[in-house]
Image (cartoon, rainbow, N blue to C red):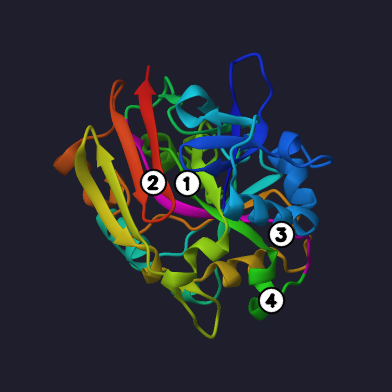
Amino acid sequence: MKVVSYRPDEQTAWRAGLLLGETVRDIASALPGAPSTMQELLEQWDAWRERLASISESAPASETDVALQGVRLGSPLPRPASFRDFYAFEAHVKTARARRGLEMIPEWYEFPVFYFSNTAAFSGPEASIRRPKTTRWLDYELEVACVIGKAGTDIPVERAHEHIAGYSILNDWSARDIQREEVKVGLGPAKGKDFATSMGPWLVTPDELEAVRVPGEKGDRYDLAMVARVNGVEYSRGNLRDIHYTFAEMIARASQDCMLYPGDVIGSGTVGTGCILELGPEQHGWLAPGDVVELEVERLGVLVNTISE
């Protein structure tokens, strides 16, 4: 299934819908008693998942259907319960550090690490991303996110898949000049990251990825090509299967002595080659107003945003 947050106009609140080809079916209208928002749906995910799947499979025409082109899609979770972004691709960590003259961090191999970011700054597909007035080094980050659909604490790696509702494309926008100064303090990226995060265009349930699942002792990986383009020119290309730490390992780490809740978002971190910092600004230049950034992940769709001043 592909589940979306959508609205037909700017005055309507975000609603949960099922994507059926080129149409969106309103979930609350199609299933009496069903939640009307994505957050509420995730909080009752086990209760509604099978009924949603049956609609998706049969998909007869309904008066609740609206054309995809006639609605605005938001981030699948317009305001997530929480957002942890991990640092899970070895190639990205090594290359980005090498460009700054730094050695690889031995501790990185001991456990997956993450930082928290601003859940109030999430945007969806086609949204305009305003460049912070204090930066000239604006960057994209090509990532994948998983969304929690079942609460839990101290979740073991081998059970982590039971807590995943679905996956989506994630763009962790970054102000590199601000970030460069902030990291010297050793606390985190702060204003270098908190101004915008894009996610979308929809939430894809794990069953849709079964054909490309790569099982492993520490959780599944997925053979999904990941591409970033700026103004139609390919900048980045990688694959989700190359991730060092699986989402299962990330969930296990995040849930140690801490409750994860439905609607929590967990980002993978940047795939190798997946940002201008790693590629080198001398090759492409930093993002500027008017630039159109496309992140495409096989089976997950295309997430498009335009930079504004």
Q: Secondary structure at mark 2?
A: loop
Q: Secondary structure at mark 1?
A: strand
In the picture, the quarter occupied by the C terminus is top left
On the image, numbered disc 2 is attached to which residue?
141
Q: Mark 1, mark 2: which one is toward the viewer?
A: 1
Residue 169 lies, in percent from the top left, at 46, 48
Q: Amino acid at mark 2?
A: Glu
Instruction: Give the mark nearer the N terminus: 1 vs 2.
Output: 2
Q: Amino acid at mark 4?
A: Arg
Structural crowding at the residue carrying mark 2, measured as other residues with C-alpha within 10 Å and reported as few (<14), some (14–19) or many (≥20): many
Tell me what residue is drawn at x 44 percent, y 71 percent: 211
On the image, numbered disc 3 is attached to which residue?
50
On the image, numbered disc 1 is attached to which residue?
170
- CA distance separating discs 3 and 1: 26 Å
- CA distance separating discs 3 and 4: 20 Å
Instruction: Give the mark nearer the N terminus: 4 vs 1.
Output: 4
CB under 8 Å between discs 1 and 2? yes
Highlighted magenta segment, given as a residue range: 137-153
Residue 126 lies, in percent from the top left, at 43, 28
Asked if residue 279 lies left or right of residue 40, the reply is left
- CA distance separating discs 2 and 3: 34 Å
Q: Mark 3, mark 1: which one is toward the viewer?
A: 3
Instruction: Give the mark nearer the N terminus: 2 vs 4.
Output: 2
Q: Amino acid at mark 3?
A: Glu
Q: Amino acid at mark 1?
A: Leu
Q: Residue furthest front?
A: 60
Structural crowding at the residue carrying mark 3, measured as other residues with C-alpha within 10 Å and reported as few (<14), some (14–19) or many (≥20): few
Tell me what residue is drawn at x 73 percent, y 69 percent: 256
Q: Mark 3, mark 4: which one is toward the viewer?
A: 3
- CA distance separating discs 4 and 1: 24 Å
Instruction: Give the mark nearer the N terminus: 3 vs 1.
Output: 3
Instruction: Give the mark nearer the N terminus: 2 vs 3.
Output: 3
